[in-house]
Amino acid sequence: MADPYIGALVKQRFEILQPIGQGAMGAVYVASDADGGQVALKLLREQDDQMRAPERFLREVRLLKQLVHPNVVQFVDAGFDPTIGTVFYAMELVSGDTLSRLTARGRVRPALALTIARQTAEGIGAAHELGVVHRDIKPGNLMLVPREDGTVRLKILDFGLAFVDSERRLTDMGSAPGTVSYMSPEQLQGKVPDRRADLYGLGVLLFETLTGHPPFPGATQVEIAVDVLRRPAVGLGELLPDLPPRFAELVARLLAKDRDERPPSAEAVVDELAAIQRESGLRPPTVSHMGPSADPASAWRLASQIPMEFIRPEPATGA
């Protein structure tokens, strides 16, 4: 069935070209911008009344307007368009590869994992300063973007499930929106999340990038949830004896069941990662300049074209 949105002109400015993915609350398309260039355009899919999807979607727009940081995707425009009959927002179209595509191929090198963690912590730290908890930190919501100066910049893509301290809860008490494998124990218990929920998600992400699999790879969502709540993660020192001990210990603290035992803030995690980087000699990854891509869809596939040592994952090791 043909996509009815292809070719539509949104707000007399954005022409929808092709789909590129799904976010927490809507479909994402590549669109040309009458003001120049291309954007990623997110459209709210069919509404779930229990989740109050329109309200949540518009709140995500308000967050992006306020949240300006190099490690967070940048807001362009938003609103309701009667032509397509739904809410939209436009954000910068970033070219790179989602972290989930890298972890699907196996574990990544510690230097890259450390850099990913540090930039993720910096991005969520900026959100936390605004009282925003992301609640869905996972590889599919992070993109590694090659830059002209030969470095890689991480971008956090999706704030669709974010929780704002100053706003009323948009989900019923006891519900737990998010991705089970990356959710903190307190989220699974239906408790009000705080910034330490994102730090737990960062711990899961780090464990997965370093080992090639999440700390609790259960066969079902229920099995994973039970393990998250009750079973401690295997120590990275056992799985990766060559990993700097301080790095393994930080991941263990991020994965603590009791949020009071996790680091107190994203800023503290950034400081810890910087110290690990200095002590271990693990250097940030770099890439050769690729230039802009002629094909917008390749924005989600560029890593497969980059002859970059750091992006090639090492074979996964057994647990």
Image (cartoon, rainbow, N blue to C red):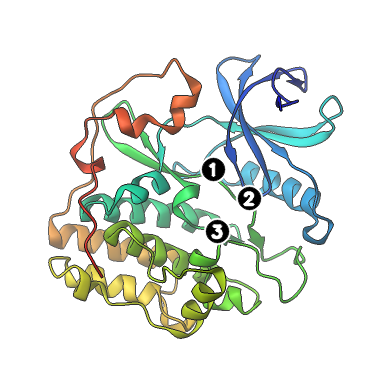
**Which disc, if any, is residue 24?**
2
The answer to which quarter of the image holds residue 186 is: bottom right
Say if 141 sits above or below 78 in the image: below
Q: Amino acid at mark 2?
A: Ala
Identify whether 225 is placed above or below 279: below
In the image: residue 215, left or right of residue 44: left
Q: CA distance from mark 2 to mark 1?
A: 20 Å
Residue type at mark 3 is: Asp
Q: Quadrant of the N terminus?
A: top right
Kindly identify which residue carries mark 3: 136
Name the image quarter holding the C terminus: bottom left
- Look at the numbered disc 3 and give the secondary structure of its residue: loop
x, y percent for residue 135: 57, 62
Residue under numbered circle 1: 68
Q: Secondary structure at mark 1?
A: loop
Q: Earlier in the sequence, mark 1 or mark 3?
A: 1
Q: Position of residue 239 (x, y in %)?
A: 21, 71
